[in-house]
Image (spheres, rainbow, N blue to C red):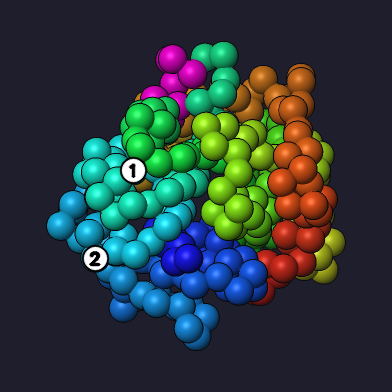
Amino acid sequence: MTILVTGATGHVGRAVVDALVAAGQDVRASSRNAAKLDVPDGVAKVSADLEDASTLEPALDGVSAAFLYTRPHGIEGFVKAAEAAGVRHVVLLSSAATLQPDAAQSRIAGLHRAVEQALAAGSFASTALNPGAFATNVLGWREDVAEGVVRTAYPDSRIGAIHERDIADVAARILIDGSHDGESLALTGPEPISFREQAAVLADVLGRPLRVEELTKEQAIERMLALGWPSDVPASILGAWARTVEEPSPVTDLVREVTGHAPRTFRHWAEEHRADFA
């Protein structure tokens, strides 16, 4: 059984590759430029652009299951290529936004939902992984942390930040056993943790103080736009953060249910990523 992992240069994609290799699977890793892939020995590398259907046939040849990032443009071509190749199961990295009550008004939810629906209409099985906040979002603090500060709006927003390896472990298990067909799995870390608490954990792990500087909503939007976020996305994200100041985002035990192990804590993540803040 050959399993294709798209987006293998990303944090989650690479972790999926590692989890599958550890499980003894035959893995094929892809990105737009295979030359940029840094994967374990024995993992086949292939260039594949989800927006270029001509690259998908060779990438999917002989593949029985695939891990997919959300890219609405070109999803129809991917579905056709997967069906033609005889792929049996696709696991999609989607978003918790599609499960929220206001999903119909959310651009983020709309983009992910379009891909979920396209896969569900395919002749193969599909599973959507719907994590909320990623612990890796904290990597966006690196420049500020170098100055001894964490700058964020709503520092007391409490979210179930999830380790990328937990998402990957869930994906790998489903890719191997073909379970959870047609399901959307709301994945979270073990507990709600505020940005202020994350900063305190990171400071402890790094062994140096970090003060928290609260940004206004307007300052946060300006920073997010400067980083290239689409103009209609920051306000939606900040609205979610504002809501979880009063009521923490819910957490689930789905990581444990699927993999058999408890989700990793934020401290675990910070210890593993200590070198990223050096």
Single out the residue that lies furthest toward the left. 54
Element at label 1: loop
The residue sitting at 42% across, 57% down in the picture is: 64
Q: Classify 10 Å Cα crowding around label 1: few (below 14), some (14-19), many (20 and above).
A: some
Quarter residue 104 falls in: top left
142 shown above or below 82: below
Number of marks present in the image shown: 2
> Can residue 51 be found in the magenta stretch?
no
Element at label 2: helix
165 shown above or below 194: below
Give how far apart the Cα atoms at labels 2 and 1 are.
Answer: 19 Å
The residue sitting at 63% across, 28% down in the picture is: 241
On the image, the x and y values in percent for residue 141 come to 59, 54
The residue sitting at 67% across, 20% down in the picture is: 243
Between discs 2 and 1, the one toward the N terminus? 2
* Residue corresponding to mark 1: 71
240 shown above or below 219: above
Q: Main secondary structure of the magenta part?
A: helix
- Check contact, mark 2 vs mark 1: CB within 8 A: no
Q: Is residue 229 left or right of residue 220?
A: left
On the image, the x and y values in percent for residue 140 come to 55, 53
User: In the image, what residue type sits under mark 1?
Assistant: Arg
* Residue corresponding to mark 2: 58
Q: Is residue 81 left or right of residue 121?
A: left
Identify which residue, 97 or 206, lies in the foreground. 97
User: In the image, what residue type sits under mark 2?
Assistant: Pro
In the rendered structure, which segment of residues is drawn in magenta? 103-111
Judged by depth in the image, the label closer to the viewer, 2 or 1, is 2
On the image, the x and y values in percent for residue 276 come to 62, 69
Identify which residue, 53 or 120, lies in the foreground. 120
